[in-house]
Image (cartoon, helix red, strand yellow):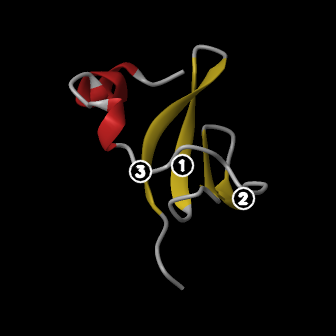
Amino acid sequence: MLTPPYAQLLADTDPAHVSAHVMIGSPRLVSADPAVMVADVPTDAGPTRVTVASSGGRWLIENARPAPVP
């Protein structure tokens, strides 16, 4: 479900060090075009901004990071 570069970046990540465990609401769309979609996802560790890219007919996660504070 990840783009290959993002999967490689996360390959050595210990899941125990990931603070978010569950979504606590519905995602809020930030921007979208035919190739890339960005959404803020509410989690139990605060909102996470997720960038999803179209790749070979599939949507794959390209990046996930804390959402900016308004």
Between disc 3 and disc 2, whose residue precedes? Answer: 3
Q: Nearer the viewer, residue 42 or 56?
A: 42
Between disc 2 and disc 1, whose residue precedes? Answer: 2
The residue furthest left is 12
Between disc 1 and disc 3, whose residue precedes? Answer: 3
Q: Which residue is mark 1?
A: 50
Residue 49 is situated, as x and y percent measured from the top left of the image, at: 52, 57
* Residue at image location 52% in from the left, 57% down from the top: 48
Q: Is residue 27 left or right of residue 9?
A: right
User: Which one is in front in this view, the residue at disc 1 or the one at disc 3?
Assistant: 3
Residue type at tag 3:
Ser
Q: Quadrant of the C terminus?
A: bottom right
Find numbered disc 1 in the image and state the secondary structure of the residue it sits on. Answer: strand
The label shown at residue 19 is: 3
Residue type at tag 1:
Val
Q: Quadrant of the N terminus?
A: top right
- Between the residue at mark 2 and the residue at mark 1, the CA separation in whole angstroms equals 10 Å
Q: Is residue 21 above or below residue 59?
A: below
